[in-house]
Image (cartoon, grey):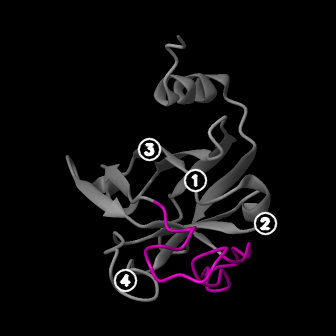
Amino acid sequence: MNDITPGANFIEILEDGKPDAVAWIKGNAENPQLSGVVRFFLTDYRGVLIEAEMYGLPNVRIANSTNFYGMHIHEYGDCTQPFDQTGEHYSYREAMHPQHSGDLIPLMGNQGYAWTAFYDKRITIPEIIGRSVVIHAMPDDFMTQPSGNSGMKIGCGIIR
């Protein structure tokens, strides 16, 4: 019997540290302190392990603060400020929000820092290369069409 669970396998993948794709996030003009990285790893489970780490989120100067921020894969890899050329949320098939394949879980920023890792079977590495990861000023409400009312695009990085 094999005692390795998917979670144990994911830990090994993260410890290996060799992502199959990466997006380096930079902040917009109002949030130049924002930076981070989103890493995409292939798994043995026909899905992608996604790890995100952000520094300098807007609540960085508020002691003991916790805020949520939207995070999505957008159609286009154009992170020209003010990040208005990224298109809509990426989706390989026609779908309503939050069923776009680019709808990701929110980031929870604690005094400007956020780290998360999760598994997603709705995307593949080849289909997201050249697209963008966008960080939004507010959390996704998972209801409002077409994009969850997550506010201003405060960070962006092209998936390479």
Say left or right for 25 vs 78. Answer: left
- On the image, numbered disc 1 is attached to which residue? 121
Mark nearer the N terminus (2 vs 1): 1
The residue tagged with tag 2: helix, strand or loop?
Answer: loop
Residue situated furthest left in the rendering: 64
Instruction: Identify the element where label 1 is drawn.
Output: loop
In the rendered view, does 64 fall on the left or right side of 26?
left
**Label 4 to label 1: alpha-carbon separation:** 24 Å
Label number found at residue 149 = 4
Q: Are marks 4 and 3 in contact (CB under 8 Å)?
A: no
The x and y percentages for residue 76 are 72, 77
Task: Choose between 31 and 12: the one closer to the eye.
Answer: 12
Residue 85 sits above or below residue 71 on the image = below
- Seen at 48% across and 61% down, the residue is 104
Q: Which residues are magenta?
A: 75-104
Q: Earlier in the sequence, mark 3 or mark 1?
A: 3
Nearer the observer: mark 3 or 1; the answer is 1
Q: Which mark is residue 116?
A: 3
Total numbered badges shown on the rendered structure? 4
Q: Amino acid at mark 1?
A: Lys
Residue displayed at 35% across by 86% down: 144
| As drawn, 121 above or below 74 | above
Check contact, mark 2 vs mark 1: CB within 8 A: no
Say which element carries label 4: loop
Instruction: Kindly report the distance in space between the C-alpha atoms of the residues bearing marks 4 and 3.
Output: 21 Å
Name the residue type under label 2. Answer: Gly
Number of the label disc, if any, that sits on residue 130: 2
